[in-house]
Image: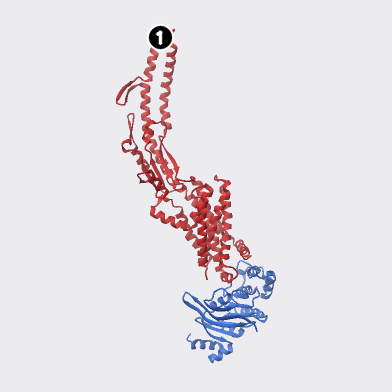
Amino acid sequence: MALRTLLGKDLRILARSPVLVVLLIAYPVVIAVLIGLALSSSPALPRVAFLNEIAPSQSTITLGNEQIHTTRYERELFAAIQPVMVSTRAQALADVRDGKTVAALIIPPELPEQLANAAGSAYVDVIYNGDAINQALVEEAIESKLAQANVLLAAQLSRVADGYIDLLLTGGDLHFLGSSFDVLGLVHAQSILAAVLSRLPPSSPVRHALVQVDAFAKIAVANLGGSRQVIGAVAAPVVARESVISGRRTPLSEYAVAVAVSVSLMFIAILLASGMLALEREENTLGRLRRGLVSTTQLLAEKALLAAVTAVVVSFVMLCGIGLFVPLGFGRAGLWLLAICGGALAFGTLGVAMGALVREVRAASLLVLLVSLPLVFLALVPSGSVSGGLYDVIRVISAVFPFKASLEALDAAVNQSQPSLASALAHLAALIAGFGALARVALRP
Amino acid sequence: MTVALEAAGLSKRFAGRVAVHNVSFTLKAGEVLALIGPNGAGKTTLLSMLAGGLAPSAGELHPSGAAGIGWVPQQTAIYSKLSIAENLRLFARLEGVTEPETAVDAMLEQTGLRERSDDAVGRLSGGNRQRVNIAVGLIANPAVLLLDEPTASLDPRQRARLWEFINLRVAAGTSVAFATHEIGEAERYASQLLLLADGEMLFLGSPAELCTAAQEGNLDRAFLALLAARGH
């Protein structure tokens, strides 16, 4: 009864404070959009674990008269990343998993053979940890440098192919396995065939067969000449073979959706909860309420619930609206709601803890902004873009603030990413208990 | 007369600092007690304990808690965005009043604010806001009304009107304890004075008894003389 009465009173106050409501709801949405846009760009030279599995003796490939040095293409790739040299594939994977590097780039031992066979494209392995920001940070850089390397490599391979085609067309010496062969060539073969045909009597039984061979030689000469352009146009000798250590890879656009919704969820819930509690102090009603009319737990729960429900409604509507433009799985809407509820309650509880610490609504709002914004950016720092020790500190700070856990819950609900929704919700539940206790202590008379 | 409120050996400590030490008194039905003393004497702390907002560090209090006690803090403790009637209705429900609308109606009548019942409290004058503040303290028809410097921010006319309002309740049997810096106000309206200084109770008795104890004919001078005599 007391809870419902207080809730009714707070809703009435909010309805009569349009400026406050605009500040609490419109502002977070603007901030969320700005952060989403900022995520589209990423800093240069990401730390990438690098492993070259090609034996030093095989790093130079000889094709025809051309020699291809794979180390030259290594250097091309290094211009786009900050390589962290590792000696085994397991170490490369561990570095990615532990967040020491944003990705691993592995040149497999079979690359020279694949290039020499030219049966198809050769591969380099690029391994990510499933974090969309990390992936965006390194993917574009590696792919652009790989494209540059491919241009150089394709030119070399094209020259080799040209040589072989010339040999087939016009003939010449072919050096193979230490021996030299005299190749006739299609042009000479066709001349010889034409001469033989002119001397054959029209009734000769082999004439029909030779006419067919002569026609083939003419077609072969014409089309092999044209194939040079085709080889140059389609060449992409090496491609990146991408994989993720665990879980489903989240596309950046869908990850940005989770970030944007988490940011708005955070601001609405924390600002509202802290503001409404600070308002009780500002109006001097806290003392009056706490002299037995309402328990501290009831008071805190009412504020946190009001803030959480408002944030859930706005965030869920926002997510559904975004879903009209970004392909999201609406079949998982129940899980979205679960993740949003978990995050909203955690932010609401943090809000009442902050509101309990200050005496005015303005001070509460300032405190929320001062605390939240830097922590949001910290939570979004890609693992490999800073040193390992610093990232560990960031990880601890992010773990005691609900944004990271809320983002992980929403990302798991929307994009099926790792860690799972259940573990993210458990993390949020622990934070709710912690901030609830903190709020009770801060509100003690 | 029945005893409405009784305190025995009431003390309060804050982190090693003694705010109120060993205060005992009895307040009977329809009696008015004035808490007087210099700033920082412990008047607000004592009233907060009597109101159930602060737990005493030592001593006994009857009745204990908020039941049957109306509390009017020094600064108006009502919602400025809500109307007079909405504030009264909210606190009537929180106080557990069985018929909230009847209580609201009675309070609007007694405060003389019926015509402005739908006005937001934030738009009222200081005097009217204080009347609503007191009405909230009285909404559950308590046996004891506790007021912390109720006229501190009011002009003389507003003060007189407020005391008229409080005296109506006293006449109906409500006991009142109020803290004040106005010795004249204490002399005019209180039947008992409780003099506090540095948390210590220096005197408990009628205004005339205070003058006799200090051997002064004037209550203002008697108040200062007693404080000086006790080293405050």
Q: Where's the N terminus of chain A, which quadrant? A: bottom right
| Closer-to-camera residue (A44/A210) | A210
- Residue holding disc 1: A200
Residue type at mark 1: give it: Leu
Instruction: Give residue B207's quadrant in the image.
Output: bottom right
Residue in the image at 40% along x and 10% along y: A198
- A359, above or below A189, in the image: below
Q: Tell me, yes or no, if residue A321 can be seen here.
A: yes
Coloration of the structure image: by chain
- A396, above or below B16, in the image: above
Instruction: Give residue A204's quadrant in the image.
Output: top left
Determine whether, in the image, residue A93 is placed left or right of residue A359. Answer: left
Q: How many marks?
A: 1
**Which residue ends up furthest to the left in the rendered image?**
A178
Q: Tell me, yes or no, if residue B218 can be seen here.
A: no
- B35, above or below B103, in the image: below
The chain holding disc 1 is A
Q: Colour of chain B?
A: blue
| Closer-to-camera residue (A406/A159) | A406
Q: Colour of chain A?
A: red
Percent position of residue B106, x then y: 69, 73
| Closer-to-camera residue (B28/B152) | B28
Residue in the image at 47% along x and 74% along y: B15
Percent position of residue A105, x then y: 39, 43
Instruction: Give residue A14's quadrant in the image.
Output: bottom right
* Other residues around mark 1 within 10 Å, as few (<14) / some (14–19) / many (≥20): few
